Image (cartoon, rainbow, N blue to C red):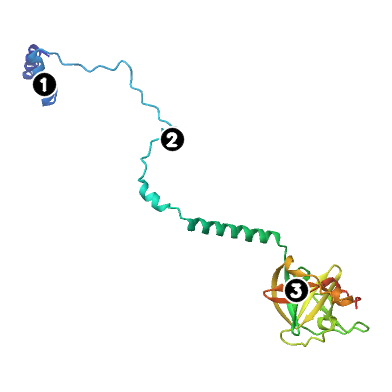
Amino acid sequence: MDLAEIRKKAKNAKKGEPLEKMAPGVEASRAQGSIQGAPLPVPSEPEHPIVPAPSLPENDLPEVAVPSLPADGLDDLFAWSPEMELATEEVYQQGLASRDEEEDEDLRRWLAFSLGEEEYALDIEGIQEIIKPRDVTDIPRVPDFILGIISLRGIIIPVFDLKKRLKLGQVDISTSARIVVCRQGDRCAGLLVDRITQVLSMPAGKIEPPPAVLYGLDRALVEGVGRHQGRMMILLNPVSVLDAELT
């Protein structure tokens, strides 16, 4: 804008026409530029429009190198010592040995009970339940170890005095006496014992065959001899024990 235009605008302002509003600095600069005769630059549109840069997915982002930490602290933290390695190796070997031992050993569960001063056991798989002694009904012409019969939920089963069955005397009926109901195939009977002691697990490797001094019926009634926590117990053969014809 030159001086002629400025004067023209001033005349129009006197006549009532509003002047174009400009910021003081801009107006002064325009006036100064017009006075000096240098035209003001007019902003022009760029030849090529600005296109925003495409965003990269997180997986394609460039890796940024992370500065490494000082090695002094890490060296102290992960310092190697022979004692640490030996302890770790020992624990590892013990774990493997115990796991292999558990996998190799065929554990069987037994119900241990006492007949007088001796301890016996039966494989728990053949045991149905344990009940308290109850009144029995006598039956004639049976072996003396058969005390009679009872009705257990509508099922008639014979009750054996296990002490008499093993020719060890007879069971004294007391508050600790129990009837162990066993089933083997189609045979089912209740075995009267002096006292139930515990249920235990015994690996097959700790079961020994019946002693050589046993023979005949005694050997048939015994499956083997087991050792548990320093105690020795006689493991009975339930198939032979429940066979009343085997006398």
Q: Is mark 3 on a helix, strand or loop?
A: strand
Q: Which amino acid does label 2 sit on?
A: Glu
Q: Quadrant of residue 68?
A: top left
Classify 10 Å Cα crowding around label 1: few (below 14), some (14-19), many (20 and above): few
Q: Mark 1 points at which residue?
A: 29
Q: Is residue 219 visible?
A: yes
Look at mark 3 in the image and give the residue it sits on: 129
Q: Nearer the viewer, residue 50 or 68?
A: 68
Circle 2 Cα neighbour tier, 10 Å, few/some/many (<14 / 14–19 / ≥20): few
Q: Residue 13 carries which label?
A: none
Q: Where does the image place residue 6, in percent across and percent down from the top left?
A: 8, 15
First along the sequence among labels 3 and 1:
1
Q: How far apart are marks 3 and 2 (CA)?
A: 66 Å
Q: How far apart are marks 1 and 2 (CA)?
A: 49 Å
Query: Residue 239, located in which quarter of the rendered image?
Result: bottom right
Question: In the picture shown, does residue 196 fall above or below 93?
Answer: below
For label 2, the SS is: helix
**Residue that mark 2 sits on:** 58
Does residue 239 appear to the left or right of 118 in the view shown?
right
Task: State the residue in front, 78 or 247.
Answer: 78
